[in-house]
Image (cartoon, rainbow, N blue to C red):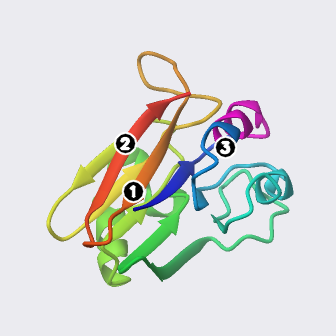
Amino acid sequence: MAKYLVFSDSHGRDDNMLDIIKQNKEAEGIFFLGDIENHGDRLRNAIPGPVYMVRGNCDWSSDAPEFLVFQLHGHRIAMTHGHRQHVVGGVDILKYWALEQDADIAMYGHTHVPFVEQTSQLTILNPGSISKPRQGDGIPTYGVIDFSEGGEVRIDICKA
């Protein structure tokens, strides 16, 4: 089993995220889905494993790419912040974009609201915001993805 942490929309407020990383030393890596606001190096230095990061609409001076598509643990993962796929209005455009990338896992942020949808064709994850949540309870959230050796993916949305 390979465990990865998924964060988005910290907007320069890193304390929750760094605490969670310290509490999850067994995590192999991190997915960050944009709007870190020039704190990418702090995140990269917080974990020895890989940090997969995309640029958000508030990451003006970031050199991170707008999207990433890659193979990991037998899955094709597509990462984007989501503003280009207009996710505030729903995930239909994101789904088409992910399928065009031949992805079976798509991750996005931008809305600050956690969302998970798993079908046989595509898993979609938004971990919510680790610092500025917009869902009803107002509690910051993040995601955990566990990749099993059999190819199964388990996703949990966790409260910070």
Q: How far apart are marks 2 and 1 (CA)?
A: 9 Å
Q: Which of 47 and 94 is in front in this view?
A: 47
Residue shown at the point (58%, 52%) measured from the top left: 26
* Residue identifier under label 2: 156
Taking 61 as reference, is 52 left or right?
Answer: left
**Residue 105 visible in the current orientation:** yes
Q: Mark 1 falls on what kind of element?
A: strand
Q: Distance between the residues labelled 3 and 2?
A: 15 Å
The region drawn magenta spans 11-21
Tell me the chief SS of the magenta region: helix
Taking 157 as reference, is 151 left or right?
Answer: left
Pointers 2 and 1 in contact (C-beta within 8 Å): yes
- Please tell me in which quadrant of the rendered image residue 131 appears: top right
* Residue identifier under label 1: 146
Residue 15 within the magenta-colored segment of the rendering? yes
Q: Nearer the viewer, residue 66 or 126?
A: 126
Callout 2: 10 Å neighbours few (<14), some, many (20+)?
A: some
Amino acid type, callout 2: Asp
